[in-house]
Amino acid sequence: MKTIEKIMVVIDANEDFSNAPDGLPVELRKALRFVTDKNAAEIKLISVGYERYLSHSFRSIGYDYAMLRKEYCDRLSKTMEELVADLKNDGYKISCEVGWAHPRYELIVKMAQDFGAQLLIQHCRAYAKLEHHHLTHDSWELVRHCPLPLLLVKDDDWGDRVVVMAAVDPLHSHNKPLQLDKIIIDAAVSVSGQIGGEYHIVHAYAEAARPFAPAGAIKEEHEKAFHELMAEYNVPDNQKHLIDESPVYALQHFGEQIHSNLVIMGAISRSRIREALVGSTAEQVLDYIKTDILIIKPSAED
C-alpha cells in the first residue's frame, strides 16, 4: 500500500467541537496523524447536509425554502472554514467543501473520487452510555459502495504508538480472493509505519464449529493456510497470531489483550449491483468492536 497522501474526512458540521482537544473533531485529529510531509499530503474536509423540510419535495406555505437551505449550508460552511483556518496557518494543505444530497453517501463517494482520495474517514458516534457504535445507514452504505479504503473512527484518541490488528482469512471463506489478504497485510505494514505504531496479523478459526471433523484436522488446515500466506512476508513470530476462536470474539478479546487501536479487515464487491457482501461476522465486528476499523477492498475490478 502506497503512502497515503490524499485524505478526505467527512465532518458533521452541525456538531460542537469547542470542547475537543485543539477544537478539532477526532476524525480530523486522526487524519492529521497520516501527515508525514505537509508539502506532500493534502486533506479535504466535506460536510454533506440534508434536511427533509428544506428539500424540494417538502411543501408548506409561508416559507422561502431556497433561502432557508442556503442559510443552513452557509452555517455548515462557516464551521468548516473555522476548522481549516488554523491548520492552514500551521502549514497543512487543507480545504473544505459543503454539499447537499440525499442519500448523502452517494455524494460523499463522488466527492472522494473527484478529489482522488486514497483514504476516506468517517466518525461513528457511540449511543449514550452503552458505548455501542452502531453504524448509521450512511456508514453502512459507504461500507457497501465506497471503492477506496474507508476508516471508521470511534471516540478514543490514538496514543503515541498505535496498535494495528489485521484480520486475514487464508482459507478464503465466501470466495474471498487471495489478493485481499495481501492488500490487508500490506495496509497493516504501511499504515502502522505512517501513523507510528506496530501491527499484528491475526487469523481466527473455531474448531468447535466443525465437531465431526477428525481431532486436530481443523487446526492443521488453518495452520497450513496461514503459514503459506505469511511465508511471503518477513513478519516476526510475535506479530503473527493463529487463534482458535470465532473471528468476532477473537478480534474483540485478543484486541483487548494487545490494546489494539485499529482493526483492518476486508470487504468484497461481486454482485451485479456492486454492493459489498457484508456477512454476519463483519456486521458484528463493524457494530460492536470498540476500536477504529479500516475497511479494505480488492483493487481489481469485478
Image: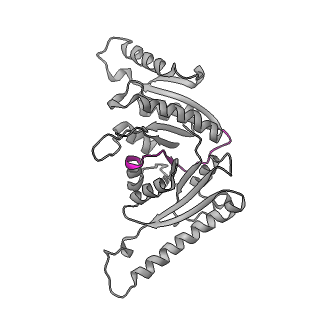
Q: Nearer the viewer, residue 301 or 287?
A: 301
Image position of 158 (left or right of 184): right
User: Which image quarter is the N terminus in?
Assistant: top right
Which residue is depicted at the point 59% across and 57% down? Answer: 25
Q: Position of residue 256 (x, y in %)?
A: 55, 35
Would you place residue 99 above or below residue 171 in this image?
Answer: below
Number of disc labels: 0
Outermost residue, top direction?
215
Query: Is 270 left or right of 291, judged from the image as shown?
Result: left
Most foreground residue, 158 or 266: 266
Residue 2 screen position, x and y as percent? 56, 39
The vertical placement of 139 against 282, above or below, is below
Instruction: Write the residue at 45% across / 17% down.
Output: 223
Percent across and percent down for residue 53 are 37, 75
- Magenta region: which residues? 143-161
Q: Position of residue 102 (x, y in %)?
A: 37, 64
* Residue 153 as seen in the image, left or right of residue 247: right
- Can I make out residue 127 in this image? no
160 in magenta: yes
Location of residue 256 with respect to 127 vertically, above or below: above
Residue pushed farthest bottom?
62
In-front residue for pair 92/256: 92
Is residue 16 among what the camera can see? yes
Query: Does the magenta segment cover residue 33?
Result: no
Which picture quadrant has residue 268?
top left
Q: Overall secondary structure of the magenta stretch?
A: loop
Point out the image quarter for the C terminus.
top left
Check the image and tell me how it is coloured: one colour
